Image (cartoon, coloured by chain):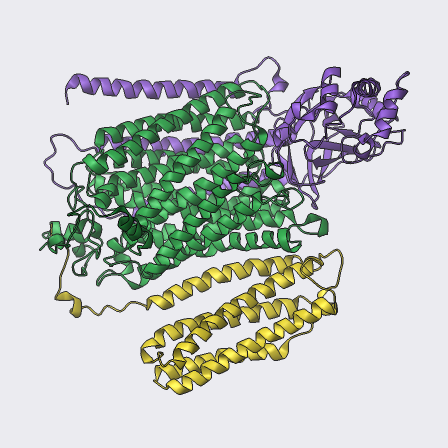
Amino acid sequence: MSSDAIAIPNAGTEARPWVEVMHEWVTTVDHKRLGILYIVYALIFLVVGGIEATIIRIQLIRAHNDFVSPQVFNRMFTMHGTTMIFFVAMPILFGFANYLVPLMIGARDMAFPRLNAFSFWLTALGGILLYFSFLGGNGLYGAGNAPDVGWWAYAPLTAKAFSPGPSSDYWTIALLISGFGSIGTAINLIATIFSLRCPGMTLGRMPLFAWLNLVMSGIVLIALTPLSAAQIMLLVDRYLGGHFFDTQAGGSAAIWMHFFWIFGHPEVYVLIIPSFAFMSEIIPVFSRKPIFGYPVMVGATVCIAFLSMSVWAHHIFTIGMSSSANSFFAITSMAIGVPTGIKIFNWIGTMWGGSIQFKTAMLFSVGFLFQFLIAGLTGIMLASAPFDWQLSLSYFVVAHFHYVIVGGILFAVFAAFYYWYPKMTGRMLNEPLGKLHFWLFFLGFHATFDVMHFAGILGMPRRIYTYEPRPGWETLNLIVTVGAFIQGVAILVFVANLVYSYFKGPKAGNDPWDAWTLEWSVSSPPPAYNFASIPVVESRRPLWDLKHPEDPDSRYE
Amino acid sequence: MSAVTSPIAESSLDWKLPYKGKVGMASLIIAESAIFTIFVVAYLFYLGKSITGPTPREVLETPIFFTICLLSSSLTIHLASKELENGHRKTFLILWSITIALGALFLFGTALEWHRLIYERGLTISTNLFGTTYYSLVGLHATHVTVGLVMLTVVLLFGLADRVGIDQSARIATLSMYWHFVDAVWVVVFTVVYLVGR
Amino acid sequence: MVRSDQIRKLLSKVAGIAVLLAGELLAASLCFGAPNNPSQLPSIFDPRSTPSKSIYHLSYFVLSITGLIFVVVFALLVYAVVKFRKRPGDDGREPAQVYGSTQIELAWTVIPILIVVVLFLATARVIHSIQDAPKPENAVEVVAVGHQFWWEFRYPQLGVVTANELHIPVSEGVQPTPTFLTLLSADTDHSFWVPQLAGKTDLIPNRVNHMWMDPYETGIFLGQCAQYCGTQHAKMLLRVYVDSSEEFAAWARAQQQPAVIGANVTAGQRVFETTACINCHAIGGTVADGRFGPDLTHLMSRQTIASGAAENTKANLRLWIQKPDAIKPGSLMPAMQLKNADLDALVDYLETLR
């Protein structure tokens, strides 16, 4: 019997007034709708953040350029970083988690649907508040405009003395609000995964996607709150006369750095672990094999989560910590490369001996593996503290983390789009356009971020609105900028594909990829209640068991 | 492709998962612990680093009575929760009200202490590093007590309207977890500020 | 798909990757090629001092190991992608469902751990050798104070105060004379980075940091502030002049003198001392004793002004005083709003301060 046998009355039979549709979307507590809201919200900010990056790149295309003033440039890099981390990467990953986790564990919705909606709207409000700052214009000599203190907002640059207007407050309060939204989603995911799994789905039988989002949520709980704490302290300093970061009163600028990176490092694992989750679902399906080493994949991720709390000061190797402290953080930072590397091997092990189909989702996944490998290795270079004393605060680091975030996370997100868009919309994305998107983006990405490493090696620091015509700097920056434009074109192709396929894409059916987890057992898109009756599972791949009754997974687990 | 369903098997599996409210509250408590940890670290880091102004030793008086109030409220809320599980609604309401009273008393004590510190000893949040870290840490805790009292009062009102019975005991237990957490934090804050810090 | 289409697609992909590789080789060559004036390219792979040299050797070791890891894993990835792709003639059967392998997984856990141990030992040795190096008796001591957006340099042993252009002696021969810097900040965070001489160390308010360098060649070495410190972070440039010991001694002697004011510049001196100039700037031997801005006692001994933002010429000096935003918009030097006659006199005065 089919789960879409239960007809939904009035489903799409006549055009409803748009006010009614809007009202439904604004008041929804359905995890699938909220997931889509998160994803669309993030896509809009992806374009905005991309425009900010383009402005940066045009300004840096040659020495002593004057495309924008230093004040505008400093706002651009601050907003670009803040937007991409908090209003693109986090929402898009929460969006996919929201949509897929209940479906994958056989639940009807998240544990706390209203909290879910509240968390989304908090995040949305944060982004809008941050961008509201641009309306400050040139009042207060521009001190009331968008924040220009970098996305880390180091003290005492954010003190009233050096940032007299409300620009830093926009950064602080917008992130405080959206931070609470993120914590709400993390609480929701944890409660959902622990309390709403369908019968038979022990934690050991959960899809890796659910496991990894569980670990990610755990990190969010412990890592986002230090940032909130530091931001509250900053507000106390700026508005109540406090001295947390007031060096004139004996306060410490370094303590902000420590608090920020105690948040900041686990934060990057909050971003990469859901990307690992995508890879762990997509690579097996397109290799036609189960994930290689499921228990170790779980164990390695938990290991990464714990270790991630002990490495933060590798972001501040240059601030003059003792040699023992530097050595400690060097070894922990190198150590965290071990469980991470293991995962790469496990994914290759999954492909090994398989029958790999290079649909667009798989192309992006292979791109992820290649680029994440390189990013991890440049990370090892940065973990070697003395080497970091040269590379830190230069374009080498900028190249490294963009390699992780764009080459790793964004590639994984693209893969997730091509894989799950059919489930969410009922239509397939166009394959030839997808391949064009991939190759264009691959070319642009490498042109920009491979070359960027060399600029750092040649002594170019980051966050500079212009530079002296040192030998080689202009050539390198030119190539970097050209690559950025190519990436922009690729994104346009992608967006066009999303829109076109929504209306004209071929119908997907329940299970276009012949996959094995529960979301593929329901219609595309799923009905509002997800499952007609709650499934019962006996292995990690319930649909494999159904499709191969002569050789079910349950026999081997 | 048919859905994965096995309507009969549901009842044959003994499938017990933790109550989602408890899991959610535990997660919230973990997050809140992290925020308090950072404020405690800042407090400890800045001990002895104030350039001017009164030191903890000069101005702090250990609030023993009000601490006892708050910690006792953990006992009363625990008892209240147990009574509700057994269906004794009246006893539950009485114990619940005592909990609120004890919590309110604690807040009153904090207000008294702050009044004394500000007006008699000249210690404000902007006086020096000690003032900043002290008021922030104790204030953060007091805010959490206030939020807790609001939640407890809401439950009291529902209880007086005869809407709280055995069926709500799981939710009451979950809310009690939050109250116990607030008390546990006070144990830490008390130790750091009034014992270690002086 | 038709064979010619397949060939065309393959060729376009190969062409794209070839272009990419060519661009990268070009970029890489810039790092290792020999530009005309070697000391004008602040490359981290062109060390001229012990700390930067130790880092350079360590980096080669790290790069070899990570390079090897890359080659091995990349080869495995390419092999998997090529060997195990779905063939057109596939009969649609699923491949063998392998769930894992304890031996393989153990191997690829243990080997990385060993690599990490080796890397860490090499790293720890260099951390210690740079950070815990003892200061010899004859080291030159410099106190560097970071400001928004310029560098103050004080030589406590020599009684010298200067700005933006750091002079240190070459450190070679039997009795090396390294320079040990104490790093402070007057306002926000900065970072002292001259790649050819040492790794960077931050200047943080209310915190004392230390670094050292012992250049073994004379020359001019370039760098700049590396920690974002506000609007004009980009133009907080550094020039380190490594002088021979005689040159350095001569320079120090000249810097120790009070201002050598030329003749016929009393009008300019009066302008300086009766306007806001003396609030921020000091000129030794006169009443001007401001500390907020750079010390101007020996202004004309410097090749640049505004912390490297402009050449130290008469025209630039005039422009800097009258309209600093034309050179460094957002710097803390105010536009002095002087009448032309006063401005000319002032510049004439400043031009005598050698």
Position of the C terminus of chain A, as image quadrant, is bottom left
Q: Is residue A294 visible?
A: no
Position of the N terminus of chain A, as image quadrant, is bottom left
x%, y% of residue C303?
Answer: 73, 19
Q: Which chain is green?
A: A
Chain C: its colour in the image is purple
x%, y% of residue C331?
Answer: 67, 31
In the rendered view, tell whether residue A156 sits above or below residue B73.
above
x%, y% of residue A251?
Answer: 68, 51
- Front residue of this view, candidates B126 and A550: B126
* Number of marks in the rendered image: 0
- Front residue of this view, candidates A221 and A383: A221
- Residue at the limit of the structure toward the top, as seen here: C36
- Residue located at (52% from left, 70% from top): B145
Chain B: its colour in the image is yellow
In the rendered view, tell whether residue A179 sits above or below residue C26.
below
- Residue located at (67% from left, 53% from top): A243
Q: Is residue A200 left or right of residue B63?
A: left
Q: Is residue C180 visible?
A: yes
Q: Is residue A198 left or right of residue A450?
A: left
x%, y% of residue B10?
Answer: 17, 66
- Residue located at (19% from left, 53% from top): A527
Q: Quadrant of residue A363?
A: top left
In the rendered view, tell whether residue A441 sits above or below residue A144.
above
In the rendered view, tell whether residue A64 sits above or below residue C150.
above
